[in-house]
Image (cartoon, grey):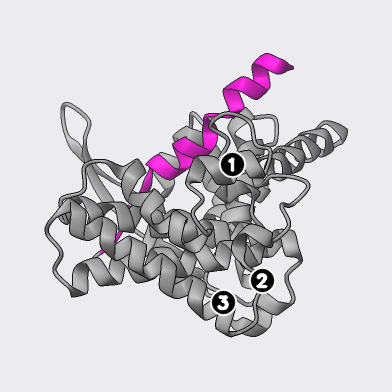
Amino acid sequence: MNEEIIKMENSPADFESIKHVDENGREYWCARELQKILGYKEWRYFAIVIEKAQIACSQSNNNINSNFGVNTKIVNTGVSTKTIIDYKLSRYACYLIVQNANPKYEAVAFGQTYFAVQTRKQEINEKEYSKLTEDEKRFYQRNLTRKGNYSLNIAARNAGVKNFDQFHNAGYRELYNGETADDIAKRKGLRYREDILDNMGSEELAANLFRISQTESKLKRDNIKTENDANEAHYIVGKNIRDVIEKNGGTMPEDLPTPKKSLKELEKEKKNKLIENIKII
């Protein structure tokens, strides 16, 4: 059983690695690539799963064509060429496919968790957000901070940053009244190298998301090109956000409670529950 779980832990990276982005910035997956990841050796069997997913899509009043875009390809067989059918799948289409796939395949179980969570993390409006549980809000905000930090690191590198620990701590120190990332981790009682963002509530994550997005904007807007100036910019943004929280009578980030369970622990619990449910089926 342990060996099986270890194998399955690589699946989320596999699903992410075959994701494509078109010229309009929309993400999609190719059905032929997804077929291989899910463990289907023959297209004819996987095509049956796609048909079931399309029926489910239609029954839920979603447009089949916008989620399952037909994408024919010409392949070389060695002696001749032939045309094969492929699909450009939306995240929702992938979600429906893994829900209708054979759960005996290892990757299918993980695909069900991955696409269910990721589909939920799509852009939601304020009304929908307010209906989420605290843990759902945490997952949503954490996804945004992860994307935000990726963009911020690119902007920081373009601004001349080489010591990224120093750069990020410049923002943390001003937002957290002098605390570095290590200080925050120690105060929260985290293990070595445990992610502090995975151990924040939704309000604390929102404050850090604001810090991240505003710092990236400042680096680009001010056309910053030196490491010292980049660190100073992060320092200023962190201080300004702290001042706003204080003026509005909000709770300082360092005084916000640490959730009892990290997001990784919650993900692991969901994963184990899904595996147990599949066993029962």
Which element carries disc 1, helix, strand or loop? helix
Q: Which residues make up the magenta segment?
A: 1-22
Q: Which mark is residue 42?
A: none
Where does the image place residue 119, in percent across and percent down from the top left?
Answer: 57, 60
Q: Residue 215 occupies which quadrant of the picture?
A: bottom left
Which circle's residue, 1 or 3, is located before the other in the chain?
1
Where does the image place residue 45, in percent across and percent down from the top left?
Answer: 55, 38
Where does the image place residue 268, in percent across and percent down from the top left?
Answer: 71, 37
Contact? badges 2 and 3 (CB < 8 Å): yes
Using the image, determine if residue 93 lies above or below residue 162: below
Would you say the magenta stretch is mainly helix, strand or loop?
helix
Using the image, determine if residue 122 lies above or below residue 149: below
Which element carries disc 3, helix, strand or loop? helix
Q: Quadrant of the N terminus?
A: top right
Is residue 88 visible to us here? no
Which circle's residue, 2 or 1, is located before the other in the chain?
1
Q: Residue at x 47, y 47 (%)?
A: 180
How far apart marks 1 and 3 lie (CA) works out to: 21 Å
How far apart marks 2 and 1 lie (CA) works out to: 19 Å
Q: Is residue 25 left or right of residue 193?
A: left
Residue at the disc numbered 3: 245
Closer-to-camera residue (68/190)? 190
Residue at the disc numbered 2: 251
Q: Residue at x 49, y 54 (%)?
A: 178
Residue 10 on the magenta segment: yes
Residue at the disc numbered 1: 185
Near mark 1 (Cα within 10 A), the count class, few <14, some 14-19 or many ≥20, is some
